[in-house]
Image (spheres, coloured by chain):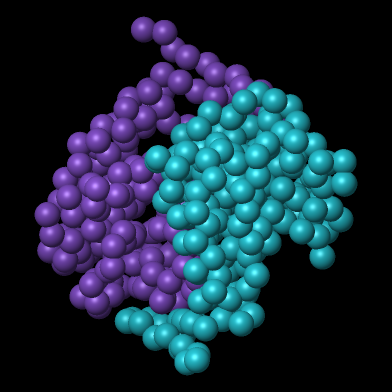
Chain colours: A cyan, B purple
Amino acid sequence: MSRLVVLRLGHRSTRDKRVTTHCGLVGRAFGADSMYYFGDKDETVENSIKKVVENWGGDFKVEWKQDPLQFINKWKREGGVCVHCTMYGVNINKMQGELRRMLSKKDIAIIIGASKVPLDIYKASDYNIAVGNQPHSEIAALAIVLDRIFKGKELVATFKDAKIKIIPKKEGKEVSRIEE
Amino acid sequence: MSRLVVLRLGHRSTRDKRVTTHCGLVGRAFGADSMYYFGDKDETVENSIKKVVENWGGDFKVEWKQDPLQFINKWKREGGVCVHCTMYGVNINKMQGELRRMLSKKDIAIIIGASKVPLDIYKASDYNIAVGNQPHSEIAALAIVLDRIFKGKELVATFKDAKIKIIPKKEGKEVSRIEE
């Protein structure tokens, strides 16, 4: 099975803490293996995501890296594919089949931006795909791309070593906790 | 055609500005008609969303309301259906067909929370649905529910009176602007 990672570009610790945290949690909940983020190093974000992994299971990783273009070029040299989510790209409706076939053969990095993404990233990416061509949210874009790739199966996955599990209910809340 | 609106509960102007703005933009871009939000009234959020509507078209509305439970009860009295997104609910994979059939007949309000959602809301909702039972993001949850209801057609919709339109491209950016 290939690896699927999220690259979060341009994190600003002054204003992106919650949005970047949501990106990490969506990555984990929707079947990615790791998130690498760029911009400001931010322990608040890292700790929020790590705490979720500790309680809810799995082995999703979050890690700060210095230079996105260097990371992308290395990823491609090692045979990986880079998919950049941008409102300027080709509609996901047309690309989802190809992304699925790709993941059966190659590692995939899904790139999402915070602040303005440099044109170099568009050029370095194998695919520039658009979750619609309207302004909305990188969190939503990431979720849709992963849901289209995994066809909803990601939403019923179980996470190993979880201390907390939810028992789905029509009304109210039911939680199963493993006491230590 | 029935109405579909987003109800954003518990907005805190101190910390939810960007997340609530993303919820509004996702609502607009993914085919909802309006977002009603509760909690703190926040002109920054309203103005960000209105500016997007002004430039990118359509007639998506954003409006603050005082009391969510009162709104929900009125919505139901007038024949509308309330769908609450919660990690404790029934998986969207099982519910999407029913939601689609519902929208062909009735108005739908999709409820997403910021801070902790009171149990009264679970009880007042016709459906408590989960976009997976893992913690992630109300922005992602909203996007997935709308994408499942509209089957991807929302991502190719056009918006009337748009001043800016994107021409989808494999690489780089192409924008068509209507000059005034």
In the picture as drawn, the residue positioned furthest to the top comes out as B180
Q: Is residue A160 left or right of residue B138?
A: right
Q: Measured from the top left, where is residue A162 in percent x and y?
A: 56, 81
Q: Identify the residue at horizontal 81%, vertical 60% (top origin).
A: A2
In the picture as drawn, the residue positioned furthest to the bottom comes out as A179
Q: Measured from the top left, where is residue A139 in percent x and y?
A: 50, 49
Q: Measured from the top left, where is residue A153 in percent x and y?
A: 64, 69
Q: Is residue A81 visible?
A: yes
Q: Identify the residue at horizontal 31%, vertical 59% (top origin).
A: B114
Q: On the image, which quarter does residue B122 sit in?
A: bottom left
Q: Is residue A132 visible?
A: no
Which is more toward the observer, B162 or A62? A62
Which is more toward the observer, B42 or A156? B42
Which is more toward the observer, B149 or B43? B43
The mark total stands at 0
Q: Is residue B113 left or right of residue B157?
A: left
Q: Is residue B56 above or below residue B85?
A: above
Q: Is residue B80 left or right of residue A83?
A: left
Q: Is residue A28 above or below residue B168?
A: below
Q: Quarter holding the C terminus of chain B?
A: top left
Q: Measured from the top left, where is residue A123 in percent x and y?
A: 74, 27
Q: Identify the residue at horizontal 87%, vertical 46% (top origin).
A: A78
Q: Identify the residue at horizontal 32%, vertical 27% (top origin).
A: B51
Q: On the image, which quarter does residue A156 sit in?
A: bottom right
Q: On the image, which quarter does residue B7 sit in?
A: bottom left
